[in-house]
Image: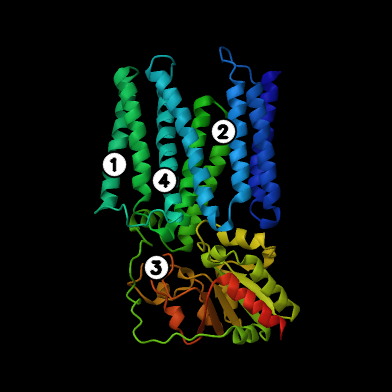
Amino acid sequence: MTTFVLQLATLIGAFAFVWGLRLLSSPDSARRGNILAGVGMTIAIIATLLLPMEGAPNNYAWIFGGMIAGGGVGWVSARRIQMTAMPQMVSIFNGLGGACAVVLAMAELIAYYGGDNQMATGQVVIALLALLIGGVSFTGSMLAFAKLQGLIWDNTLTLPRHNVLNIILLAITLGVGIYLLTLGNGPLANTLAYVFLGLSLLYGFSFVIPIGGADMPVVISLLNSFTGLSAAAAGLIYNNQIMLVGGILVGAAGTILTVLMCEAMNRSLLNVLIGGFGGGGASTASAQGDQVVKEVSHNDAAIRLFYSDRVVFVPGYGLAVAQAQKVLKEVDDLLEANGVEVKYAIHPVAGRMPGHMNVLLAEADVPYPKLLDLDDANAALSDTDVVVVVGANDVVNPAAEDDPGSPIYGMPILRVWDAKNVIVLKRSMRPGYAGIQNPLFFHDKTNMLFGDAKDTLSKLTEEIKTL
């Protein structure tokens, strides 16, 4: 009877995971999807705790203590986190998932090499894989957090021919793991297990170091898939179907998202991992000579927007930094009230994590149908009167199409210059996250409106109200 109840709970939990993931595909249902997945996880945890285990100590105090402490930290963090720091939070939570797999795998390996536990060769292989993948996910995610937080700059730790060093380090790590399989248990194997752990953690750092800041959305997605795979491996170790299903879902979703984002950038995953794109390289188009930047006043910009037929906003990380999404929605409402058709053009890699702009606009209650993906946005831009670029830079850079020397050459971008007019809201003329200048700022159709995005949009709102 107990086995049947556990299997039923596992089935319900797995269904909740799958259906919750399905609901996450739309901002309208994403909240329900999160709640449903959380219910599934709760059912799985309760069922696992009720499963009788022969010889297991009564450690419920430790289990519930850890759940309360972890849940409390997660709740407080989620309530206090700013939208601008959401990518950093995702990196930390993702890394902690990898750390859990490391702890579980290491506990089993220590017990095996110490002679206290018996494991088949296949189980040892799975434990070592969980240790390696989880270790890479943990330290890699922590370094991604440091980069996103601005604690470490892309080129700070990079060594000459760093990618070659990464290959050598990975080969050494795999070599130690293979040697461990031939030793069986014993003191030497026990020591080498710690060496393998250290190498895995070190490789996680080294793996992420040469990857440039502009590729962080891809890296976060890839590390997320690593965490899922490590959780699935831990599920195999403990024969826990819910861990296996959950890990496979996370791993598969992260992998698919990584591939889609690479396609959106017209680059291979290998190129992202070894290219070091976004680390501050210069484009051959960065020297703009004596080209003139045209500025526009708040009043003139408001008039152009108010009397347009179609307006498209292009949100970027600058919008998130200024926490201006709700003010942007207010501008949207004023324009819509005057009969202006308003849309939002969303580039797949805008922001610092996958879907960053979608989440940002959903927080401001922007209807999902108003969000256009890359292809639909480019198709609509030629019929647009005014495009307003709010804090975006690299995703609207023409160098991706006409400058073979640019690091972003070949990357599909939003062709905002196809519209009749372009207004760029920006703090200054400093390059974007990829570290390269944007020729769009000097385009004949472009007018710059300098200042903090929230303050600028607030002034536009007041100007529109007077019209």
Task: Find the residue positioned furthest to the left.
Answer: 160
Which residue is disc 4 drawn over? 140
Mark pair 1, 2: CA separation? 30 Å
Which residue is depicted at the point 35% across and 87% down?
290
Which of the pair 457/404 is nearer the observer? 457
Q: Position of residue 308 (x, y in %)?
A: 66, 85
Q: Please tell me which of labels 3 and 2 falls first in the chain.
A: 2
Total numbered badges shown on the rendered structure:
4
Q: Name the residue type under label 3.
A: Ile
Which residue is disc 1 drawn over? 169
**Quarter assignment of residue 339:** bottom right
Cβ atoms under marks 3 and 4 closer than 8 Å: no
Mark pair 3, 1: CA separation? 29 Å
Q: Name the residue type under label 4.
A: Gly
Q: Name the residue type under label 1.
A: Leu
Q: Is residue 168 above or below residue 411?
A: above
Which of the pair 54/191 is nearer the observer? 191
Which of the pair 435/82 is nearer the observer? 82
Mark pair 3, 2: CA separation? 39 Å
